[in-house]
Amino acid sequence: MAGSGTDPTQQLNDYIRTMHDQGILDDNFDQLLALRREQNPRFINELISMFTNDAEAYIAEITNALSLTEVDFSTIISKLHQLKGSTSGIGGHRMYQACCELRVAAADGDKDRCDGLFLRVKEEFNTLKQCFESISEMRRNIISNGTRRRRRRPL
Amino acid sequence: MSGNGASSSSLNMISGEDVVNNNLTALVVDDSPLLRLLHDIHLKKYGLKVQVAENGKVAVDLFHLGASFDLVLMDKEMPVMNGVEATKELRAMGVTSMIVGVTSKDGPGEQQAFMEAGLDYCFEKPLTPEIISFLLEELNKHNNKD
């Protein structure tokens, strides 16, 4: 009897396409998926983990710089540059755009605008993290489905 | 092509398998660990021997110590010494490596100022496999002329 529901690989492909349509991911993420096939199976997870850890550190430093009585705009710009680079590398399109807008506000020395735009950066980061978590979950399902099928194969 | 921020769509696309070269060396200069890793993996895929540096000063110091590289991928904005300063210094030292700038997407004048420092090409980061293929093809052509 054929299994009910969508094939897990198709589900993952559809999900990634949706993320593209919503502007959450861009082609740079697809480049990583292409690299994954040539690297170790945990490559994508390691890269995502590196991105997440770095992004959280940069966000913490920006939070600190924004909270000072004399806002440290140069630190904000410096950390944003690094955050933008990582985000672009991982393919986080909307988060990258949010970082660009925040950078403009920081360069203008506009604290109020920075506060609002930084909120957006953090929201987009959370969205991106959830997206990566969903992708990881689907990939785990694909791997475990593949393992179950191999076990069921008759001798 | 003069390399003034050429887009990947204007490049002659060749298969990566055509330019695998085990003799070429590359230096990736970028303050982002993730981008260093990405470019490192992309270049190694084509058989290059890759070293990384986290800022322009580390890159310049490597050359001062006698290192040489066929290809240098140079980020623009870095702490300690940025890509523009590092490129100017390398050219002043007489370095003839292909130096390729990598910039973020904003700033219309960004690539032009960087090119004037002595770059051969300048592209948006991260570099795609198509752009890397193009660069390696150009490197191979250049090496074959010598």
Image (tube, coloured by chain):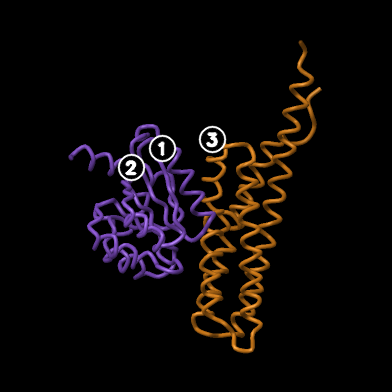
Chain colours: A orange, B purple
C-alpha separation, residue under disc 2 versus residue under disc 3: 20 Å
Q: Which numbered circle lies on residue A38?
A: 3
Chain of residue at mark 1 = B
The residue positioned 36% from the left and 68% from the top of the image is: B110
Q: Is residue A134 above or below residue B122?
A: above
Residue A96's place in the image compared with B144, above or below, is below
Q: Amino acid at mark 3?
A: Glu
**Which amino acid type is shown beneath numbered disc 2?**
Leu
Q: Amino acid at mark 1?
A: Tyr
Q: Are marks 2 and 3 in contact (CB under 8 Å)?
A: no
- Residue that carries the numbered disc 1 in the rendered image: B46
A153 left or right of A77?
A: right
Which of B45/A109 is in front?
Answer: B45
Tell me: residue A129, above or below residue A154: below
Which numbered circle lies on residue B21? none
Query: Mark 3: which secondary structure?
Result: loop
**Residue A5 place in picture, x, y as percent:** 77, 35
Q: Regarding mark 1 in the picture, which secondary structure is present there?
A: loop
Disc 3 crowd rating (10 Å Cα; few below 14, some 14-19, many 20+) is: few
Of all residues, the one furthest to the left in this rendering is: B146
Kindly identify which chain the residue marked by label 3 belongs to: A
